[in-house]
């Protein structure tokens, strides 16, 4: 990875994209803009996103505003959200439907399977 000093943009060594922070071996800490972007890409409310991460919606709000930082555990799950968007963006709809219909545990399983399962498309 390289850093563009003028724009403070990080570029992926593998694909050269400045948006590819979830590439294998390239997982810097997700910033507040990343968290908000991923939540919106998954079309989740702060309440739903918080449920997936096991935190209150106000905690998600604090992360997005830069008032607080996620724990390493929560960061790891946010990285999984990013991997799903990079590898299988259509899976986001299934994850949200599962969250509503079957609860957090099943939705987390589906999210992890979409990111790391043997059938997950590789980019």
Image (cartoon, helix red, strand yellow):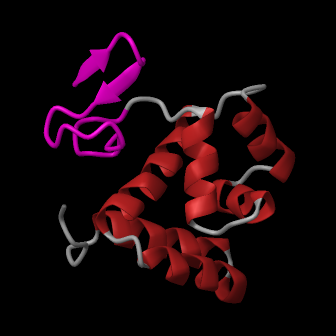
Coordinates of residue 102 in the picture (x, y in percent): 66, 86
Residue at the far right: name it: 58
Residue at 41% of width from left, 65% of height from top? 112
Residue at 72% of width from left, 27% of height from top? 66
Out of 40 and 96, give the one closest to the viewer: 40
Residue 97 versus residue 11 in the image, above or below: below
Q: Quadrant of the C terminus?
A: bottom left
Q: Quadrant of the N terminus?
A: top left
Coordinates of residue 88 in the picture (x, y in percent): 34, 71
Q: Magenta residues? A: 1-27
Residue at the far front: name it: 6
Residue at the far left: name it: 14
Residue 74 showing in the rendered view:
no
Quadrant assignment, res 32: top right
Quadrant assignment, res 90: bottom left
Out of 59 and 109, give the one closest to the viewer: 59
Coordinates of residue 73 in the picture (x, y in percent): 55, 40
Residue 32 versus residue 107 in the image, above or below: above
Q: Is 102 a magenta residue?
A: no
Residue at 31% of width from left, 17% of height from top? 4
Residue 31 versus residue 24 in the image, above or below: above
Residue 75 versus residue 99 in the image, above or below: above
Quadrant assignment, res 63: top right
Residue at 42% of width from left, 17% of height from top? 8
Instruction: Examine the residues drawn in magenta and state their main secondary structure.
Output: loop
């Amino acid at each position: 990875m390289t850093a563009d000093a003028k724009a403070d943009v990080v570029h992926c060594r593998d694909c050269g994209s400045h948006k590819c922070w979830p590439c294998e071996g390239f997982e810097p800490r997700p910033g507040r803009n990343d968290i908000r972007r991923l939540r919106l890409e998954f079309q989740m409310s702060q309440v739903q996103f918080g449920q997936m991460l096991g935190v209150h919606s106000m905690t998600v709000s604090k992360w997005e505003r830069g008032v607080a930082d996620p724990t390493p555990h929560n960061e790891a799950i946010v990285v999984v959200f990013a991997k799903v968007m990079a590898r299988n963006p259509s899976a986001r709809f299934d994850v949200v439907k599962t969250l509503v219909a079957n609860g957090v545990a099943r939705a987390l399983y589906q999210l992890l399977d979409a990111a790391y399962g043997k059938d997950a498309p590789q980019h």
